[in-house]
Amino acid sequence: MIIKAPAKINLFLEVLNKRKDGYHNIETLFLKIGLFDKLNFKLIKKGIKISCMHPDVPEDATNLVYKAAKLLQQKTGSDKGAHIIIQKKIPVFAGLGGGSSDAAAALLGLNKLWKLGLEQKELLGLARKIGADVPVFVTNYTAAIGRARGDKLTPLDLENKFWILLVKPDISVSTKEVYGRLSSSLTRTKNDVKLLVHALRSKRMELIEKTLFNRLESAAFKQYKQLNKIKQMISAHGVRAVLMSGSGSVIFGLMNSRKEAIKLKQEFQGAYDVMVVRSL
Ligand code: ATP
């Protein structure tokens, strides 16, 4: 059985405050995109075996797919085994949620493979235990607003699709470090995700440009000047809606036209890892 695990970008990420559990309360807008890892599930007698050719993805118990499988076994008492082969297409340490999406695909895939019959609500509960970005991938929402740790979800129907240029420099940003660098000023003005939703529905790039936001950008840009340089370069080519996704290091440009996105891809090819994808 094969399941496709999509990537996401964050079109909005505001950090509200730090929680007692160490996480931050955030408000974010997830948009799923047409870039997928593939997970192949095979029933075996015993144990959980992970195979992945990607050098930065562990095949041991630290793989989020392994954690998902273990949680399912603990919850249901199932002693069936699985060999899960992960074919990685989503760049790692990119802010595209690859590991989280793989974990969600494992919850969905193993629920079927092992005939566990868990309902979505139960799968969401397990997803939350794995990570704040996992629940959105358990749902079939193509876009959603995430509140609390980013895991309290409201689905969004955007109707229109976007073409997206993804530029990934050879930098691995640590999510923990970026959050740690945030200045904790409480007086700053908060940005409003509702204005962005309105802008996205209008398809007007000049409105989207004004309302896209990522609170983590300045902290990441301070540490890695190259990220801001990439953002400036994409903007210099006439793209109005440009932002860092999640805690980085992918910088994306949002466009209405495929042609424009493909043309830009050619500009950046060679220097960076670049892709053109469509929103789901
Ligand atoms: P996010 O947007 O969720 O922050 P990210 O791009 O920062 O995503 P990922 O690529 O999802 O991060 O994960 C990177 C880390 O997670 C690495 O340390 C990697 O070893 C570990 N990891 C565990 N399981 C996986 C997996 N299935 N795929 C990718 N990375 C995984």
Image (spheres, helix red, strand yellow):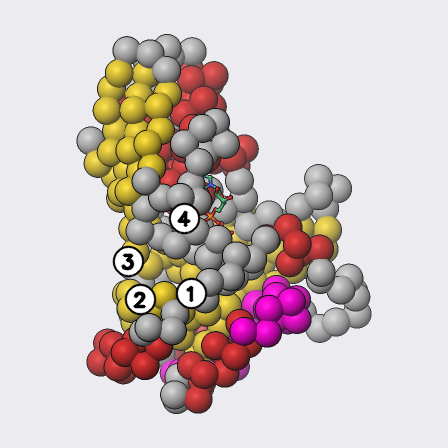
Structural distance between the alpha carbons of marks 4 and 3: 12 Å
Q: Secondary structure at mark 2?
A: strand
Q: Which residues are magenta?
A: 204-226
Specify the amino acid type for callout 3.
Gly
- Mark 1 or mark 2: which comes first in sequence? 1
- Mark 1 or mark 4: which comes first in sequence? 4
Specify the amino acid type for callout 1.
Lys
Q: Is residue 116 above or below residue 271?
A: above
Q: Mark 1 — residue? A: 168
The local crowd at label 1, few if under 14, some if 14 to 19, many if 20 or more residues have their Cα within 10 Å, is many
Q: Is residue 87 above or below residue 189?
A: above
Q: Secondary structure at mark 4?
A: helix
Asked whether residue 205 is drawn in magenta, I would say yes
- Mark 4 or mark 2: which comes first in sequence? 4
Q: Mark 4 — residue? A: 98
Whether residues under marks 4 and 2 lie with C-beta atoms below 8 angstroms apart, the answer is: no
Q: Nearer the viewer, residue 245 or 221?
A: 221
Structural distance between the alpha carbons of marks 1 and 4: 14 Å
Which residue is at the far left? 1
Whether residues under marks 1 and 2 lie with C-beta atoms below 8 angstroms apart, the answer is: yes
Structural distance between the alpha carbons of marks 3 and 2: 11 Å
Q: Who's the residue at 59% across and 53% down the image?
A: 175
The local crowd at label 2, few if under 14, some if 14 to 19, many if 20 or more residues have their Cα within 10 Å, is some
Structural distance between the alpha carbons of marks 4 and 2: 15 Å
Q: Nearer the viewer, mark 1 or mark 4?
A: 1
- Mark 3 or mark 1: which comes first in sequence? 3
The disc at residue 34 is 3
Badge 4 residue CB within 8 Å of ligand 1: yes
Left or right of residue 165, residue 242 in this image: right
Structural distance between the alpha carbons of marks 1 and 2: 9 Å
